[in-house]
Image (cartoon, rainbow, N blue to C red):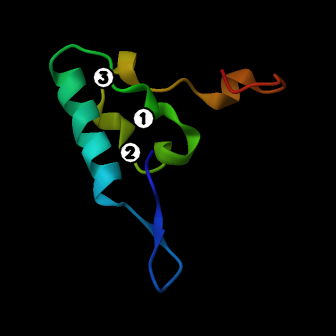
Amino acid sequence: MILQSRSDDGCRGLLSSQQQLIERARWCVDHGFAPPAEIYRVEYRRHIDWATFPSWARPQDPEAFAGCCHEG
């Protein structure tokens, strides 16, 4: 499980475990493997620069599922 911390100013920052997850995901896609499933959890998506990932590894646009009972 990945934990998030809050700094004194209330902004959320990356913990080392989050950074490790992102680095592991980048290693996987660089070697042609799917990234770890945890990387797609909604709470972690905003910490990731998805432009650095190939299109096949990026999460789907949640707007494409507007009106559905799930995200995709």
Residue visible at 36% across and 27% down?
36
Q: Position of residue 12 (x, y in %)?
A: 48, 68
The part of the image, by quadrant, that contains residue 39 is: top left
Residue visible at 28% across and 57% down?
16
Looking at marks 3 and 1 on the same chain, the residue that comes earlier in the sequence is marked by 1
Looking at marks 2 and 3 on the same chain, the residue that comes earlier in the sequence is marked by 2
Above or below, comparing residue 24 to residue 9 in the picture: above
Q: Name the residue under label 2.
A: 48
Left or right of 7 on screen, residue 16: left
Q: Name the residue under label 3.
A: 54
Q: Where is residue 19 in the image (x, y as percent from the top left)?
A: 28, 51
Binning the other alpha carbons within 10 Å of mark 3 as few (below 14), some (14 to 19) or many (20 upward) gives few
Left or right of 10 on screen, residue 34: left
The part of the image, by quadrant, that contains residue 14 is: bottom left
Q: Where is residue 8 in the image (x, y as percent from the top left)?
A: 47, 86
Q: What residue type is labelled 1?
A: Ile
Q: Which mark is nearer the camera, 2 or 3?
A: 2
Looking at marks 1 and 2 on the same chain, the residue that comes earlier in the sequence is marked by 1
Above or below, comparing residue 23 to residue 65 in the picture: below
Query: Farthest residue toward the bottom?
Result: 8
Q: What residue type is labelled 3?
A: Pro
**SS class of the residue under badge 1?**
helix
Q: Which mark is nearer the camera, 3 or 1?
A: 1
The circle drawn on residue 68 is none
Residue visible at 57% across and 40% down?
42
The circle drawn on residue 39 is 1
Q: Do the residues labelled 2 and 3 touch (CB within 8 Å)?
A: no
Q: What residue type is labelled 2?
A: Ile
Q: Where is residue 24 in the image (x, y as percent from the top left)?
A: 23, 35
As rendered, which of 8 and 17 lies closer to the eye?
A: 17
